Each structure stands twice: as C-alpha cells, then as structure tokens.
C-alpha cells in the first residue's frame, strides 16, 4: 500500500506543531515521570539515582502533602459550583436586548483581562488589617476587622474569592455564546405553554446549555486544581500551610528545597488528578450526547 501526496499533506502541515509539542511538552513530561522514580536533588549536576518507589513512600507519609491536597480539594469544592452557575446567571442577564448592555458585558469581563499580579496585589491591600473591607466592617458596627489573610480559618476562602472574581467574566462569555445559539422560537413556544419568566430558563436554557455546563465545570475544576498565582502573591502558602495548594507545594519542593525528584512525584499525582477530571468530562459529554440523541 502506498501513501499518495494528498494523504500525506495534512500530516506535513501538522509536523511542525507535533515537533514543537514533543520538545516542549511530551519530552519534559516523560523526563519528569522518570525523575519521580529517582533521587535528584541539591546538586543537580550529578546524575539521578534510581530509587524505585521511595519517593511515593515519602509522599504517603508526608503530612504537609496531605494538608495541601486537602486545601486543593476544598478549593475545588468551593470554587467550581459558583463558577458553574453564577456566570450562567450573569450571561442570562447580559443576554437581554437592552440599551447599553454591552457596557455591562465589558464591566463583567474586565477582571479577566487584568493581570493576576495586579489583581492579587489589589486584593491583598483590600484584605489588609486597615484595608477597605475591614474599614467598611468597622463602619457598619464591627468592633474589629476580620483577619482575611492571617487567620487559618479565613485565608483559603479569601483567596477563593479572588479566583471567583477573576473567572466570572471568562465563563460568562462561554455561556453567552451558547445562549445566543438558542432560537427565540423555543422561548416563544414555551411562553404559549405557560413556561415564562424564570421557569423558561429551567425548562429550556438549562437543558440546552448542558454541554457548556459540563465544559465550564471541567475547565474551572482543572484551573482550581492548578491554582498558584493567587497563593504566591497573596499568602505564600501561609499561615501554617493553611492556604498552600498542591501546585504551590510542588513549587516549594522544587525551587526552594531543590528536591527535584520529589517535586516530580508530586507533579505526577497532580497529573493523575487532572487527567481523571478530563476523563470525567469526556464521559459526561458522551452520555449527554447519547441522551440528547435518544430524545430526538
């Protein structure tokens, strides 16, 4: 069997991207996988020494790792539901045909284009002991402010608020694209059947937006699992590791402690978590497609 030029042409166009992807993503990932089974730290000029599952045994006994994994799961559970449903509400609101509605869309999307460094510093000032938020609390009757970034009970939720604030506009635009693909005739027919107001969104909008809901759920879950910038800028993982996530712990062990192999082991666990979330998204997407096809 011979391959003609027409069959080979698409692969020639893909070849530069495949080479670039292999050099920048696939090969480093394979190296990290190998290093997770070696001892490679401090003096990185020395060759890695094979230690088998020693790093994984250390990981299982590492209390800080389990604390950071718990923080990451709390982050995931706290951020994802809000970023799935609240942007949908905003998208429905800004999808109305009103004068000046584009200004509201721009206002909601503005946090997305702001650098996380700028946003993190701004929110850090807002959360300060004498910051704006505590000043407002004192004006309305609270004798003392809230230690937003210095209390283990508050710090993780304070950082979550920044992630939610930054992500609302981004996911709103995704939902807005889906809403504008829904024909108005469906809402008109629903109004004739007595489904109007908020009920029409429950009967029509939510079922038709299920693929977008699943997409946003997976994207926001992966983003919440990989959160780093907010923690680095605002808290440095403190106090007492109460805001330290898995990615920040990986960074600490790799670049502060120079334990490269152990950091690769943490990275492998993080990869498995993100990979599981991606598989979950594919399964849900396929199942929703099957259900939609059966209804048709």
Image (cartoon, rainbow, N blue to C red):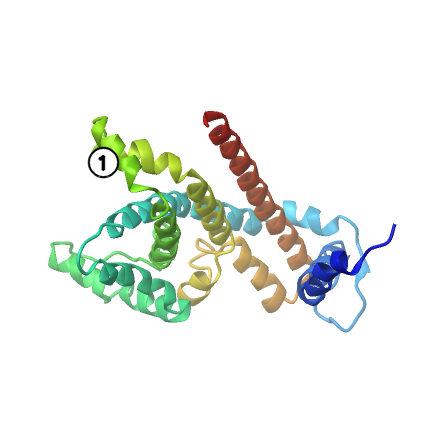
Q: Quadrant of residue 277?
A: top right
Q: Which of 102 and 22 is in front in this view?
A: 102
How many numbered marks does the figure carry? 1
Q: What SS does tag 1 mark?
A: helix
Residue 252 visible: yes
Q: Which of 8 and 62 is in front in this view?
A: 8
Residue at horizontal 57%, vertical 50%? 65
> Residue lying farthest right?
1
28, above or below 242, in the image: below
Q: Which of 190 and 259 is in front in this view?
A: 190
Q: In which quarter of the image is residue 50?
A: bottom right
Q: Where is residue 147 in the image (x, y as percent from the top left)?
A: 29, 58
Q: Position of residue 69 (x, y in %)?
A: 53, 47
Residue at horizontal 23%, vertical 50%? 96
Dot 1: within a 10 Å radius of its alpha carbon, few (fewer than 14), some, or many (20 or more) residues? few
Taking the image as shown, residue 239 lies to the left or right of residue 50, namely left
Residue at horizontal 21%, vertical 52%? 97
133, above or below 92, in the image: below
Residue 150 visible: no
Residue at numbered disc 1:
198
Q: Which of 35 and 106 is in front in this view?
A: 106
> Residue lying farthest bottom?
45
Q: Position of residue 221 (x, y in %)?
A: 48, 47
Q: Where is residue 289 in the image (x, y as percent from the top left)?
A: 51, 34
């Amino acid at each position: 069997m011979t391959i003609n030029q027409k069959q080979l042409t698409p692969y020639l166009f893909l070849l530069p991207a495949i080479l670039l992807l292999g050099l920048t993503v696939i090969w480093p990932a394979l190296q990290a996988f190998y290093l997770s089974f070696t001892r490679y730290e401090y003096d990185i000029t020395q060759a890695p020494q094979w230690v088998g599952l020693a790093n994984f045994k250390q990981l299982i006994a590492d209390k800080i790792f389990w604390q950071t994994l718990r923080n990451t799961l709390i982050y995931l559970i706290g951020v994802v539901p809000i970023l799935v449903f609240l942007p949908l509400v905003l998208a429905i609101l800004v999808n109305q045909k009103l004068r000046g509605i584009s200004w509201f869309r721009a206002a909601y999307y503005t946090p997305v284009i702001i650098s996380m460094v700028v946003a993190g510093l701004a929110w850090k000032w807002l959360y300060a002991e004498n910051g704006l938020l505590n000043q407002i609390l004192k004006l309305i009757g609270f004798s003392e402010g809230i230690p937003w970034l210095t209390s283990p009970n508050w710090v993780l939720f304070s950082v979550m608020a920044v992630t939610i604030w930054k992500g609302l506009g981004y996911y709103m635009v995704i939902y807005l694209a889906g809403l504008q693909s829904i024909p108005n005739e469906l809402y008109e027919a629903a109004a004739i059947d007595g489904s109007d107001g908020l009920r029409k969104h429950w009967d029509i909008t939510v079922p038709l937006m299920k693929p977008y809901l699943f997409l946003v759920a997976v994207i926001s879950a992966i983003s919440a699992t990989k959160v780093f910038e907010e923690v680095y800028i605002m808290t440095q993982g403190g106090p007492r590791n109460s805001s330290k996530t898995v990615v920040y712990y990986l960074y600490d062990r790799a670049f502060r402690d120079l334990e490269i192999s152990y950091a690769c082991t943490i990275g492998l666990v993080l990869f498995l978590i993100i990979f599981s979330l991606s598989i979950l998204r594919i399964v849900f997407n396929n199942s929703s497609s099957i259900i939609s096809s059966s209804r048709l």
